[in-house]
Image: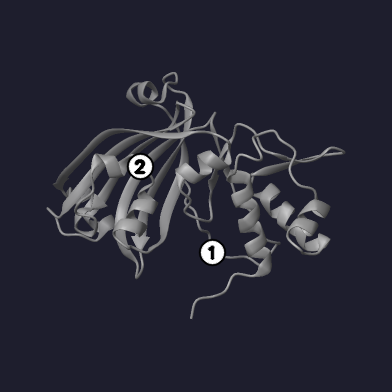
Amino acid sequence: MAKTASFHEQLIDKLRKLLRSRQFVPGAKFLTEREIAERFDTSRPTANKALSSLVSTGLLEFRQGAGTFVRESVLDYDLQHLVSFTEKAKAAGKKPGTQVIALQKLSAPAALTQALNVPPGEPLFYLERVRLADGQPVIYERRHVVARFCAGMTKADAKGSLYGFWTTKYRLTISGADESIRAVNASPAQALVLGIKPNNACLLVIATGFMEGGIPLWHEETLYRSDAYEFLNQLGGVSGPKPAQGRMR
């Protein structure tokens, strides 16, 4: 049985949709705690909790003595959920765009067979894209996708949200991804694509994405401009020692 979202989660979702509307542009003052309570027929503590959640995820910012405002010019990367770049760009008040550099079918190289759980020679789509915000390149993406799960994918499909394409056209259920993130310096070729100087700092995300049942769908190496992106996370309280989740390099 599907789990029903709590009223608090529903309220946050409604406020996110409001942020994506044209009513609140970046830099604009957002609804107050009282206005949210009245508009959505809830208590002020619940409204405050929802506002605090949107501040912690970087969509809003609190200014002492002035109120809560729609955050300007930054694109945030959610470390806890897979979120479409298109939606993130719109939430930041920017116009999303995509340049598809390459989309071709090839045989799975030996280096990817384990990550994608496929035999050597399995047909894959190789996709290379640049994602833009207000016309500025911010992400350089190289992705391999198991072709049998979306055999009809075209360049036109690749110009939009892949998550939306997979879940809508092919009814695939995306369950999550395993990813690592590290700082790198852009190579001359990468810098040219992103419109930055060679050796500028970037963030490299290497990830394998899964469908329901833990079945791998894609593997990606995606480069994010560090001057256009920040990575956000929300931590819980202090707990007892746990096994390390990272690696020393």
Point out residue 187 in the picture as x, y percentages from the top left corner. Answer: 37, 25
Q: Which residue in the structure is indicated by mark 2?
A: 221
Which residue in the rendered view is the most extreme toward the top? 197
2 versus 82 height, above or below: below
Q: Residue at 62% x, 65% y: name it.
A: 241
Q: Earlier in the sequence, mark 2 or mark 1?
A: 2
Point out residue 128 in the picture as x, y percentages from the top left corner. Answer: 29, 37
Q: Residue at 20% x, 54% y: name it.
A: 147
156 versus 173 height, above or below: above
215 versus 140 height, above or below: below
**Residue type highlighted by circle 1:** Pro
Q: Residue at 58% x, 38% y: name it.
A: 92
Report helix, strand or loop for mark 2: strand
Total marks placed: 2
Neighbourhood count class around disc 1 (C-alpha, 10 Å): few under 14, some 14–19, many 20 upward: few
**Residue type highlighted by circle 2:** Glu
Point out residue 57 in the picture as x, y percentages from the top left corner. Answer: 63, 49
Mark 2 vs mark 1, CA separation in Å: 27 Å
Report whether 177 appears left or right of 55.
left
- Viewer-nearest residue: 173 or 249: 173
- Callouts 2 and 1 close, C-beta under 8 Å: no
Indicate which disc residue 148 carries. none
Query: On the image, which quarter does residue 12 sit in?
Result: bottom right
Point out residue 212 in the picture as x, y percentages from the top left corner. Answer: 36, 68
Q: Residue at 48% x, 51% y: name it.
A: 83
Which residue in the rendered view is the most extreme toward the bottom? 1
Neighbourhood count class around disc 2 (C-alpha, 10 Å): few under 14, some 14–19, many 20 upward: some
Report helix, strand or loop for mark 1: loop
Quadrant for the C terminus, please. Answer: top left
Report whether 117 appears left or right of 237.
left
Q: Which residue in the structure is indicated by mark 1?
A: 243
Query: On the image, which quarter does residue 44 sit in?
Result: bottom right
